[in-house]
């Protein structure tokens, strides 16, 4: 029971930090200093790993099954990214069977879409390496 | 006692005549080395062929003699069937079935392509794979991705009957191969990452009428347990053996999917299969042993009632599904002739049990790097978990580092083979470790229910991500081990020619000497191999065949290379991306000696 309470507290804290300090520095959706990220970008990696990894591969790096998102985000706009996650995408032809579901009803994705985008954009911009991002200490 | 009622009804509806005929036909077909009549070659799942034209001396002269493109570019698991002059080839989604004429180098006799709603695609964890077909009574049985179980006329490809086995809107999909036992088709369900309630279901071979349904988790009348007669390690399992190990209603989305292989002992009249991970991957969210996820089941195929069970990984904390094949072999175990069941689990232990009683005889690591548990207590059956690697003890939002094996398991669904000539098992294995961090997730029907992050890397100081090993299941020891650069993800075949075959993720078909492991032959097929090597004889000649087409969990986890741990490996680290070696494909390659 304690664990549950703790998890809720942590999740809430993540949310708060996303709205407070996870905000944008200039035109970048993420904050990365010396290879370390803010909590929001880190949370993006976690949520990515939960809901996206099983198709798009570890760390957004792509797989035999779904596109490399590091590459995709070099040309895809933020609006298009949001539309695709929320609305899904179907690309089925004779040689292709690619289907992305809509995540609009998935709490763990819809609520943290800013964080997921921030993480993937940081990866796409080449400022964040693969693996579990380290966090810097944020001002309370 | 709901299950007793069910038992009576099933017994009444059973037609003994039909039961005998379908069973005998299959046993006869699988005993004929010319055919490959079952997904597992035969009911014992030994994957051993008594053909010997291709042997240790001449296998070096093997060459591809004809190929066939399936037209689908996804992970190709499983193997084709051969019945007489016809080969039956299956594909991943959209699950096309081809009947190929062996008298004309694979000319298409008929093609069946089901119409499935493509919305099933993203509900499939880890690629749209399918592990193959079954044949019985003039029918080809296919379990489609959307869980439609269909019987096709083997001569024409026309649908004889079709039945819906699950609901993809709840995350229920199908990847496993159905198996025919007597007058019934047995089929499992996938969706452990989507919070399904796993189950094995039996349908009438004649018309698809449901016969029984045995859940992996839930109340006794749903899991078809007799509290007094179903045993665990020789003792009655007692009432509510599953319910008492879950908090509240969690069992309803408790997983225990049944996506692996099914074997059968006709003399004992028991079918054997395993169940997968409990949902979610976050162990702190589901206290208890979570029975009967991660379990070996022995059930009566007529009634579905469980004879015995054994849970390998109570309260899973690492995604070590227990669905790998159960190989039935009569071997000496610690000096005593034994009707054994041998199982190489994802958790890295090779288990030998008495398949009649479910008694645990041997449980030893088949990869020396396995570290999450020190050993398995043969009396209690429980693994001794190392606290450092317990993602539950370390808790949510804590990154547990250096756990071996990774969630891929020390071995996944790629089946091992047994050679009665050497008495050894030949096992394609993964050699990958991980960091694992569980965290809280919420359940939404039909959506991933995972709750853990995962980073994978090779064991410290090692450069190979896989091994192909020979294993003595009587003592629990590795006899020899051939390193593979990538996880060995192709299913093995042994033959009376003293050769073991397997496929690799780069796309090699390899042949090795069963005694020494020495490589005798290799050929690079068009794409990575996650299919199983099979053999058959046609017009007096032996052939070996395998499906290529990289994908599955291997294609997702390894395509882009590993996350870390490659620092010390120099050039080796750089080449770890599988995409540098192979690309998508969908091909059958048939090898011969001519």
Image (tube, coloured by chain):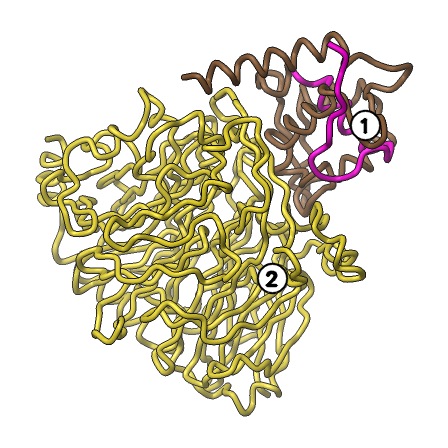
A135 vs B539, left or right, is right
Residue drawn at x 21%, y 45% as measured from the top left: B304
The residue labelled by disc 2 is B529
Q: Which chain does yellow denote in the image? A: B
Residue at left 22%, top 53%?
B183
Which dot, 1 or 2, sits closer to the camera? 1
Q: Is residue B297 magenta?
A: no
Q: Specify start and end residues of the magenta stretch as a single range.
A: A112-140
Q: Which chain is brown?
A: A
Disc 1: host chain: A
In three-dimensional space, the C-alpha distance between marks 1 and 2, rounded to whole angstroms, equals 33 Å
Under tag 2, what secondary structure? loop
**Would you say residue B164 is visible in this rendering?**
no
Find numbered disc 1 in the image and state the secondary structure of the residue it sits on: helix
Residue at image position (55%, 48%) is B406
Q: Position of residue A93 (x, y in %)?
A: 68, 40
Tell me, yes or no, if residue B512 can be seen here: yes
Chain ID of residue with mark 2: B
* Residue annotated with mark 1: A121
Query: Which quarter of the figure has residue B121?
Result: top right
């Amino acid at each position: 029971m304690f664990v549950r309470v703790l998890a809720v507290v942590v999740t809430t804290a993540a949310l708060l930090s996303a709205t407070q300090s996870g905000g944008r520095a200039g035109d970048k959706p993420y904050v990365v200093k010396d290879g370390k990220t803010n909590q929001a970008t880190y949370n993006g990696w976690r949520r990515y790993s939960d809901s996206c990894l099983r198709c798009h591969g570890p760390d957004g790096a792509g797989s035999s099954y779904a596109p490399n998102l590091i590459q995709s985000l070099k040309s895809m706009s933020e609006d298009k990214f949001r539309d695709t996650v929320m609305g899904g995408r179907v690309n089925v032809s004779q040689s292709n069977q690619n289907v992305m579901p809509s995540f609009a009803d998935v709490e763990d994705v819809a609520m943290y879409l800013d964080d997921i985008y921030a993480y993937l954009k940081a990866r796409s911009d080449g400022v964040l390496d693969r693996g579990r991002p380290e966090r810097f200490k944020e001002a309370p | 006692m709901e299950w007793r009622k069910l038992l009576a009804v099933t017994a009444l509806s059973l037609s003994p005549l039909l039961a005998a005929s379908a069973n005998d036909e299959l046993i006869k077909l699988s005993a004929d080395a010319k055919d490959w009549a079952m997904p597992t070659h035969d009911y014992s799942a030994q994957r051993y062929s008594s053909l010997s034209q291709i042997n240790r001396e001449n296998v070096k002269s093997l060459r591809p003699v004809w190929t066939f493109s399936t037209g689908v570019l996804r992970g190709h698991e499983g193997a084709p069937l051969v019945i007489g002059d016809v080969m039956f080839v299956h594909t991943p989604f959209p699950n096309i079935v081809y009947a190929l004429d062996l008298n004309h180098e694979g000319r298409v006799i008929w093609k069946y392509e089901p119409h499935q709603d493509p919305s099933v695609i993203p509900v499939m964890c880890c690629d749209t794979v399918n592990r193959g077909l079954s044949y019985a009574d003039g029918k080809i049985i296919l379990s489609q991705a959307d869980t439609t179980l269909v019987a096709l006329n083997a001569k024409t490809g026309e649908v004889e009957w079709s039945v819906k086995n699950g609901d993809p809107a709840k995350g229920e999909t199908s990847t496993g191969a159905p198996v025919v036992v007597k007058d019934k088709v047995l089929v499992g369900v996938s969706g452990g990452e989507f919070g399904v309630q796993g189950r094995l279901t039996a349908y009438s071979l004649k018309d698809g009428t449901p016969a029984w349904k045995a859940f992996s988790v839930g109340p006794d009348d749903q899991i078809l347990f007799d509290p007094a007669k179903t045993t665990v390690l020789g003792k009655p399992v007692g009432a509510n053996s599953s319910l008492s190990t879950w908090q509240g209603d969690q069992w309803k989305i408790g997983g225990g999917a049944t996506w692996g292989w099914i074997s059968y002992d006709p003399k004992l009249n028991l079918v054997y299969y395993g169940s997968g991970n409990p949902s979610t991957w976050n162990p702190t969210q589901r206290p208890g042993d979570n029975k009967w996820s991660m379990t070996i089941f022995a059930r009566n195929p007529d009634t579905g009632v469980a004879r015995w069970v054994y849970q390998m990984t109570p309260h899973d904390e690492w995604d070590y599904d227990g669905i790998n094949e159960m190989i039935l072999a009569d071997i000496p175990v610690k000096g005593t002739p034994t009707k054994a069941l041998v199982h190489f689990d994802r958790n890295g232990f090779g288990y030998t049990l008495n398949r009649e009683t479910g008694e645990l005889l041997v449980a030893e690591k088949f990869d020396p790097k396995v570290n999450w548990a020190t050993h398995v207590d043969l009396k209690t059956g429980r693994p001794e978990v190392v606290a450092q690697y317990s993602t539950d003890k370390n808790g949510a939002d804590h990154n547990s580092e250096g756990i071996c094996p990774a969630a891929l398991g020390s071995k996944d669904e790629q089946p091992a083979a047994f050679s009665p000539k050497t008495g050894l098992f030949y096992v394609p294995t993964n050699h990958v470790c991980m960091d694992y961090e569980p965290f809280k997730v919420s359940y939404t029907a039909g959506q991933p229910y995972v709750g853990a992050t995962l980073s994978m890397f090779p064991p410290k100081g090692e450069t190979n991500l896989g091994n192909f090993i020979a294993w003595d299941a009587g003592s629990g020891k590795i006899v020899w081990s051939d390193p593979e650069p990538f996880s060995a993800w192709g299913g093995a075949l042994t033959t009376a020619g003293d050769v073991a075959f397997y496929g690799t993720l780069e796309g090699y078909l390899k042949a090795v000497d069963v005694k020494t492991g020495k490589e005798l032959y290799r050929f690079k097929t068009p794409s990575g191999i996650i299919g199983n090597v099979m053999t058959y004889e046609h017009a007096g000649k032996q052939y070996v065949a395998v499906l290529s087409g990289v994908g599955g969990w291997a294609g997702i986890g390894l395509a882009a290379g590993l996350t870390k741990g490659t620092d010390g490996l120099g050039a080796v680290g750089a080449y770890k991306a599988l995409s540098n070696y192979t690309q998508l494909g969908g091909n059958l390659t048939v090898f011969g000696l001519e």
